[in-house]
Image: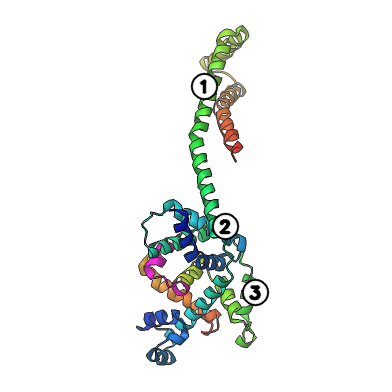
Amino acid sequence: MDEESFRVLYERHARSLWAFLFRMTGDRTLTEDLLQETFYRFLRAASARESESHARNALFRIATNLARDAYRRRRIRLPFLSEARDAASMPDPAQRPQDARLDVARALAELRPRDRMMLWLAYAEGATHEEIAAALGVRVSGVKSMLARARARLAEMLGRRPSRQEP
Amino acid sequence: MQECWLEHEVQAAAASGAEALPPHLREHLERCPACAETAAIVEALRRERARLAGFAACPDAGAVWRRLQRKAWEEAAAAAGRPITAAQVLALAAAGGVAGACYGATSAWFQTALRRASRWAWSMIEAGHSSPSEYSLLWIAAAAGAVLLLGVPVAVYVALSSDKH
């Protein structure tokens, strides 16, 4: 790949990858590192004749793996995790933070990393079940139910669903 | 909450924005809690994505390209250097062995010490009545020799490879 093709590819995907990685890590420096590493690994493996959608899927697959590795190495401390827990535990939804954007960020932070990635890929990026399965290393047949569970958890945290009763 | 057969359609339409929902889907959302939930989550995540992409601090493409090229070059250089380092270690170990053999063959002091040590070791093994402490001494001497033989090349290899970083 030459510099001009790289520039086109980068301009097209860097922002959405940045948003994904930032929402997964909550850390700007780490996000920038992972973004560059994503493109580096893509360049090392990419063939020049890859289609646009193939390149996009490959980039998100690499970014997902890098974010998962970062979780495994415990480099990730989502800064608003405790706030999310506090907000979610408030019995009266009216007392919960009013800012919808913060609510989404906090609720996502409260989810398990795999659920967070899955929801983002499916609903923010519009990835298919096959693409999600490939990115997360799970079976396609399991994506539907995992996604439904993750969506239910997020809806619950966003106050769109009553909380499940503890046994 | 039960899954709805229109969910995929709702998801695809919601991805284009709530205002893009066709009338039949809008009506459906009022009756179907599962689809209403999906539409709300798609909309919330899309909005969050747009917000983040708006202030994404992506470095310049040209700068990233140059950095990645440099990284690729450095990795290639390091990969090319690795066999040389291994060869250097082997050569050093071989040179050490040859030097040791020459010294052993020419030094009268070393020859005498070696003969004494091997005679002592054989006498202990053949007699079979040596004390446990003498056996331990023999094992310690053998282990120390093995550590020297294996450890020195490894230490040299580690030292040479860490110099490169």
Question: Same chain, marks 3 and 1?
Answer: no
Q: Distance between the residues labelled 2 and 1?
A: 43 Å
Q: Is residue A129 magenta?
A: yes
Quarter of the figure with residue B113: top right
Tell whether label 1 touches label 3 (CB within 8 Å).
no
Residue A124: percent from the left, percent from the top? 48, 73
Q: Does the magenta stretch include residue A130?
A: yes
- Between tags 3 and 1, which lies in front? 1
Is residue A72 something one can see in this rendering?
Answer: no
Tell whether label 2 touches label 3 (CB within 8 Å).
no
Between A99 and B125, the one nearer to me in the picture: A99
Say which mark, if any, is on residue A83. Answer: 3
Q: Residues within 10 Å of mark 3 (few under 14, many from 20)?
A: some
Q: What residue is disc 2 on?
A: A33
Q: Is mark 3 on a helix, strand or loop?
A: helix
- Residue displayed at 44% across by 58% down: A5
Q: Distance between the residues labelled 3 and 2?
A: 26 Å
Q: How far apart are marks 3 and 1 (CA)?
A: 63 Å
Between B154 and A130, the one nearer to me in the picture: A130
Q: What element carries label 2?
A: helix
Q: Earlier in the sequence, mark 3 or mark 2?
A: 2
Residue B34: percent from the left, percent from the top? 43, 84
Question: Same chain, marks 3 and 2?
Answer: yes
Q: Name the kind of residue labelled 3 in the image.
A: Glu
Q: What residue is disc 1 on?
A: B94
Q: Mark 3 lies on which chain?
A: A
What's drawn in magenta, residue-wise?
A: A122-135
